[in-house]
Amino acid sequence: MREPDPSSLGAGERLRRSFGADDAAWALGQAVLRRRAAAKFERADEMLFTRNGLEQATRRSVARWRAQRFADAGVTEVWDLGCGIGADAMAFLEAGLRVVAVDADPETAAVAAHNLALVAGAPGFSRTRSPDCLAAGLTYDVHVGLAEEQTPPPGAAIFLDPARRTARGRTWNVADFTPSWDFVLAQLSSDRFVCVKLGPGVPKEIIPYGVQAAWVSESHDVVEASLWNRLSEGPAVVALGAGGATTLARTGGRPGLDVRPLGRYLIEPDGAVIRAGLFEEIAPAHDLWLLDPHIAYLSSDEPLASPLATCFAVREVLDYDRRTLRRWVAEHGIGTLEIKKRGIDVDPAALRRELKPKGTASATLVLARTLEGTKAVVVERLSFLEPRPRSEAT
């Protein structure tokens, strides 16, 4: 359907005249969802979606990274238990794996079947599991069912994305997870290759012992955490960017970072690094230190070029005093003002209005706790050619 504005009254009326009210509503809904999905999926205009499924779907870059991890581990068949609209299952297929995709909701499973057919080029949908589907040479199967009721064959890997939504919204109460958290833990403790997708805000106290917890970011936006039972245990970071994936894991034996006064450069770690707590692992050969023992701002006297952090050159250090800041903004003709902060009780938008920026110049202020007290640091963001992706102890 090619409508300039599929949500317009005119588009709806034309479709209702041609196809009837129910079909028109469905088609218009798909057109709206496809537009929303364009940022996530290259083939959004061919795919089908549900509203919740699109909201919860894995980004393509993340799904492809995950699928490659499965393939690199020697996995040949994966069961996606709770496949949603099939975003991860599509990536598994693209990586050359055989896929069984399962969802408890018939409509969602049918949507996944359509989307997987775009990759595989042939239908593979059944409402009940066909034991001979993969044996017959099909690369995938989609069916309706509960995760707990499935019986993957020996050697098959498992991917789980537990639903964490209740009538009150998203939750980290494991008693509300679907499938159950006990089922998830049982899979992680099995001898299969298992990955469990969770939100980036996963409480560390629910992460089981002996797994790798990987926080994933894309362009410094933390998008998920995932648990892996057959990779090096402990926290890990995956930063996805134009140059590929940079991975980082704790290698052990490194002392924590010192707390020292602000140096020539202020460094803001990637959000995934902050979640994983791997500050000292960003650049082992680099002399980095903390400005405050509890705040994730680092400093150095040498610039740091890393996909795992943003580096700022320190241009001036001001007292964190509103009159001082207002005077500085006026004297420098600052009209565009970026304010960054961490660990300080202030609303950057409200402070920006209070400072009344007016002029043609731009500036970035970082409000940071230091050994000399809270400071407003005038910084310049440095741009580097993105270093070649590296991988450590994954």
Image (cartoon, rainbow, N blue to C red):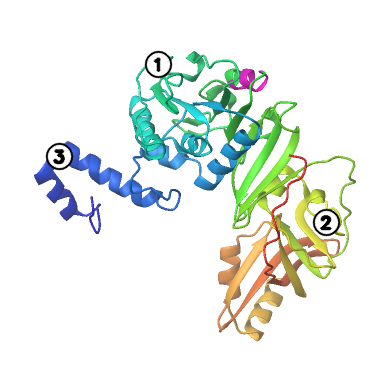
The three-letter code of the residue at mark 3 reads Ala
Q: Which residue is mark 3?
A: 21
Whether tag 3 and tag 2 are in contact, CB under 8 A, the answer is no
Q: From what the image shows, is residue 143 above or below residue 328?
A: above
**Left or right: 245 as drawn, with respect to 57:** right
Q: Which residue is mark 1?
A: 130
The three-letter code of the residue at mark 2 reads Leu
Residue 199 shows up from this direction: no
Whether tag 2 and tag 1 are in contact, CB under 8 A, the answer is no
Q: Secondary structure at mark 2?
A: strand
Residue 377 shows up from this direction: yes
**What secondary structure prevails in the magenta region?**
helix
Residue 294, horizontal then vertical, whole percent: 79, 50
The picture quadrant where one finds residue 341 is bottom right
The Cα–Cα distance between marks 3 and 2, rounded to whole angstroms, is 61 Å
**Callout 2: few (<14), some (14-19), or many (20+) C-alpha neighbours within 10 Å?**
many
Q: Secondary structure at mark 3?
A: helix
Q: Nearer the viewer, residue 88 or 254?
A: 88
Q: Is residue 187 magenta?
A: yes
* Residue at 74%, 63% in the rendered image: 305
The Cα–Cα distance between marks 2 and 1, rounded to whole angstroms, is 57 Å
Q: Quadrant of the C terminus?
A: top right
Q: From what the image shows, is residue 356 above or below residue 345?
A: below
The magenta-colored residue range is: 184-190
* Residue at 40%, 16% in the rendered image: 130
Residue 153, horizontal then vertical, whole percent: 55, 15
Q: Which residue is mark 2?
A: 290
* Residue at 15%, 47% in the rendered image: 15
Q: From what the image shows, is residue 257 above or below residue 341?
A: above
**Left or right: 310 as drawn, with respect to 335:** right
* Dot in front, 1 or 3: 1
